[in-house]
Image (cartoon, rainbow, N blue to C red):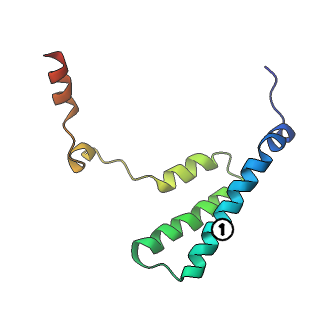
Amino acid sequence: MKKRSADDWVDDCYLEVRARILQIAADLDRIDRAGVPTGSAAQRRQQLEKSLTILLSDDPDRAAAIQHLFSRDYQSDWRENYGLRDSSTVNERAQV
């Protein structure tokens, strides 16, 4: 299978990417017109700004870096924190 060139990728996705960028710009304009966010909204706005910095970098793993930015750190007790049953209990019931 032939490897696609950068020209092919740009030609194929240009309009879709352009539309998404315009949507992001419009959303940021709306936020700015509404005033300065405070509290957790300010923290989320900072995340958005940091994600744009990552997006504009030359890092070949931008998507992973942005996903990590918006993800929570792993917590081994996440099931308990969200009120979910222990997976061993679920497996035991399935075997009955």
Q: Nearer the viewer, residue 92 or 61?
A: 92
Examine the rendered structure and indicate whether residue 87 appears above or below residue 66. above
- Please state the horizontal and vertical placement of residue 69, each as a whole percent of the image: 50, 56
Indicate the secondary structure of the residue bearing disc 1.
helix
- Please state the horizontal and vertical placement of residue 67, each as a whole percent of the image: 52, 50
Q: Is residue 91 visible?
A: yes
Q: Is residue 82 left or right of residue 17?
A: left
Q: Nearer the viewer, residue 47 or 21?
A: 21
Image quadrant where residue 90 sits: top left
- The residue that appears at 25% across and 48% down in the rendered structure is 82
- The residue that appears at 67% across and 51% down in the rendered structure is 59
At label 1, which amino acid type do we have? Ala
- The residue that appears at 68% across and 46% down in the rendered structure is 60
Can you say which quadrant of the picture contains the N terminus? top right
Examine the rendered structure and indicate whether residue 82 appears above or below residue 47. above
Q: Is residue 52 left or right of residue 15?
A: left
- The residue that appears at 82% across and 23% down in the rendered structure is 2
Q: Is residue 11 left or right of residue 30?
A: right
Furthest-left residue in view? 96
Can you say which quadrant of the picture contains the C terminus? top left
Furthest-top residue in view? 96
Examine the rendered structure and indicate whether residue 1 appears above or below residue 36. above
Identify the residue under disc 1: 26
